[in-house]
Amino acid sequence: MVAATAIATLIAMRRVRSGLLSHFAMQMALWGLVIGAIAALEWRGVHLRDLSGAARAERLLWMNIGFDAGFVGIGVVLGLCGRLLARNSAAVGAGVGILVQGFGLLLIDLQFASMVSR
């Protein structure tokens, strides 16, 4: 959300029309809102777990890691197709935004998995 706000402010202050930057900022803002909403909804259900609950949480974590890797792949494909096929900077910006968010989530989930799997 901070990066999206900073980029949107920069674009507005300089009065620059950049499809790449505006779509990158839009992806950053949307991902921040969605992840924040998911965290807010799940916050109530957080409590100490027994062994079976911990095993379910670990399986869910590995599923999320798979989704994160998929988001990285989607970002790469969208960015490359936008650049090579469509020559559209807006698609490149959206692809890079998805790539950055997916890679960040992947790193966070992998770090958490290394702690949980011990």
Image (cartoon, rainbow, N blue to C red):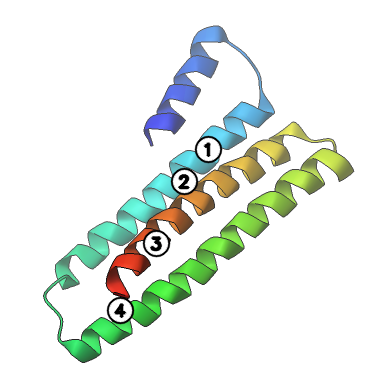
The residue located at (49%, 24%) in the rendering is 7
Question: Answer yes or no: do the residues labelled 1 and 2 have beta carbons within 8 Å?
Answer: yes
Q: Which residue is mark 2?
A: 30
- Nearer the camera: disc 2 or disc 4: 4
The location of residue 19, given as percent across then percent down, is 67, 29
Q: Residues within 10 Å of mark 2 (few under 14, many from 20)?
A: some
Disc 3 to disc 2: CB gap under 8 Å: no
Instruction: Please state if 40 lies on the left or on the right of 95 as rendered.
Output: left
Residue found 47% across the figure and 67% down from its top: 65
For this view, does 7 lie left or right of residue 33? right
Mark nearer the N terminus (3 vs 4): 4
Callout 2: SS: helix
Circle 4: element type: helix
- The residue that disc 3 covers is 109
SS class, disc 3: helix
Identify residue type, mark 2.
Answer: Leu
Kind of residue indicated by mark 3? Asp
Q: In x, y percent, where is residue 42?
A: 24, 66
Q: Which residue lies at the image location 33% right of the left edge and 61% below the top edge? A: 38
**Badge 4: how crowded within 10 Å, few (<14), some, or many (20+)?**
some
**Residue 70 relative to residue 49: left or right:** right
Q: Amino acid at mark 4?
A: Ala
**From what the image shows, is residue 70 above or below residue 6?**
below
114 or 101: nearer the eye?
114
Type of amino acid at the residue the image marks with label 1: Met
